[in-house]
Amino acid sequence: MIIDIPLQVNNALDILSSAGFEAYVVGGAVRDAVMGRKVNDWDIAASSLPAQTEKAFESFKVIETGMKHGTVTVIINGFHIEITTFRIDGDYSDNRRPDSVSFTDDITKDLSRRDFTCNAVAYSPSAGFIDPFGGLEDINKKIIRCVGDPGTRFREDGLRILRALRFSRTLGFDIDPLTADAIHENAGLLKNISSERTVAEMCKLLPFAGADFLDEYSDIIFEIIPELKAEKGCRQNHIRHIYDVWMHSCKAVENSPSDAEIRFAALLHDIGKPACKTTDENGVDHFYGHADTGAEITRDVMNRLKVSNRMKNHIITLVKYHGFTPEGFTDKTFRKYIGTLGEETIKDLFALREADIRAQSPAFHEESLKLNKAGYDKFLSLLSQEKCFKISDLNINGTELIGLGIQQGAVIGKILSSLFDEVISDKLPNNKDALSKRAKELYDNGNS
Ligand code: ATP
Ligand code: MG
């Protein structure tokens, strides 16, 4: 078997070997190419030291990406290629980063520091595959297996736990039983991982994660978001439900579009339920106020995970409004929602609601999906009309009101607010003439 390597990458391999060094394509590039998947980054591992690599590429643009770790990036015809010196990692005393790295001229040693066998294969057109850990066989069998002893490898870097889950789902691989056991045994190591790295992996994992997988690795998810633990076994004795809150949430994730933030919201959308659960005299469970409570818990989770403000607010909003039923809204109310939450968020809310419905009892799918579609159609119809969803969408502004002779000050805000109310109630067209005339009327009435 040969790998079809882009011209520029072949060029880089040739330059290194002409300078007397060993050089291979490694990691994800080999794995994806063998699988026939699109390769994102063509990374090269080489026996040259970083300075030697730079020298070999002196006629090209070179970026010193991470000299300490041995990485330089060369740009060949606009193509970025990372070239990293064969490396051995030192001890990992903090479960996340090697205390030191040292360079080696032995590709096998470099491959042995890599996380999974499928990521530990090297290839060059002249040498063929270098595969000391059976990576090609595991790629063939679709198995994620640690290079070496799984427990040791996870204790070196706890993030590998999440990488294992992520590669398993994105590649469609099973996790080898010994590797899976070590994942469960070492779940606690995730505490040592920075929240930024954790969130980045979660965002890559969630779009590919199904309900059974999330449940199988619930201990890992609960390590990251302990607030979800109370969902497991939290029964929902209600005709609309057939799962406990946890499994319902897993199904909601599975049914969501492959968008990381919608899926994050689906995972968290009922996080307020355990705290809000009540059971009535007929034994039926209710969860009054769970969306608001859930939004507050979500805020704590997002703050702890240090996600960006934009992502935090988006996910909190999705959780807070996940139960909205806009098909029952008046046009005026719906327009206000669009103005406050924004078109994109409303779209995401419809997607989340559909996923939520599909995670409930199938007996209600048809009816509930119909309502959701009615709401969505109404949303589209409001969008197709002239857009006025917030005061700033009015075809008149404060300065123009002052130009009409209206006194500067609080009255301007009041008049704009009245105009907006009348426009979204379909009582007044959103054009300057009509708005000006009405503004003067309101002002005169207020002052008479
Ligand atoms: P993709 O970029 O498609 O997510 P990849 O395999 O290229 O997959 P990267 O995170 O880009 O993954 O890392 C490149 C290679 O570096 C991996 O294939 C693996 O060999 C090695 N590697 C990366 N992170 C680790 C880690 N935490 N522990 C051990 N090896 C790692
Ligand atoms: Mg990569």
Image (tube, helix red, strand yellow):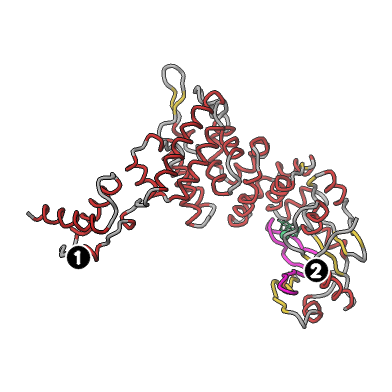
Residue 289 left/right relative to 116? left
Point 42% across, 51% down: residue: 342
Q: Quadrant of the C terminus?
A: bottom left
Point 61% across, 51% down: residue: 203
Q: How many marks?
A: 2
The answer to whether 276 is drawn above or below residue 145 in the figure is above
Proximity of marks 1 and 2: CB atoms separated by less than 8 Å: no
Q: Which mark is residue 9?
A: 2
Three-letter amino acid code at the position of disc 2? Val
x%, y% of residue 170?
71, 48
Figure quadrant of residue 439 = bottom left
Figure quadrant of residue 111 = bottom right
**Where ligand 1 lies, by quadrant?**
bottom right
The answer to whether 360 is drawn above or below residue 137 in the figure is above
Q: Which mark is residue 141?
A: none
* Residue span colored magenta: 76-101
Point 33% across, 38% down: residue: 330
**Disc 2 residue: CB within 8 Å of ligand 2:** no
Residue 320 left/right relative to 188? left
Which element carries disc 2, helix, strand or loop?
A: helix
Which element carries disc 1, helix, strand or loop?
A: helix
x%, y% of residue 378?
42, 40
Foreground of the two, 307 or 399: 399
Foreground of the two, 266 or 276: 266
Q: Which mark is residue 402?
A: 1
Q: Is residue 82 magenta?
A: yes
x%, y% of residue 153?
76, 52
Q: Residue furthest left?
A: 448
Q: Is residue 60 magenta?
A: no
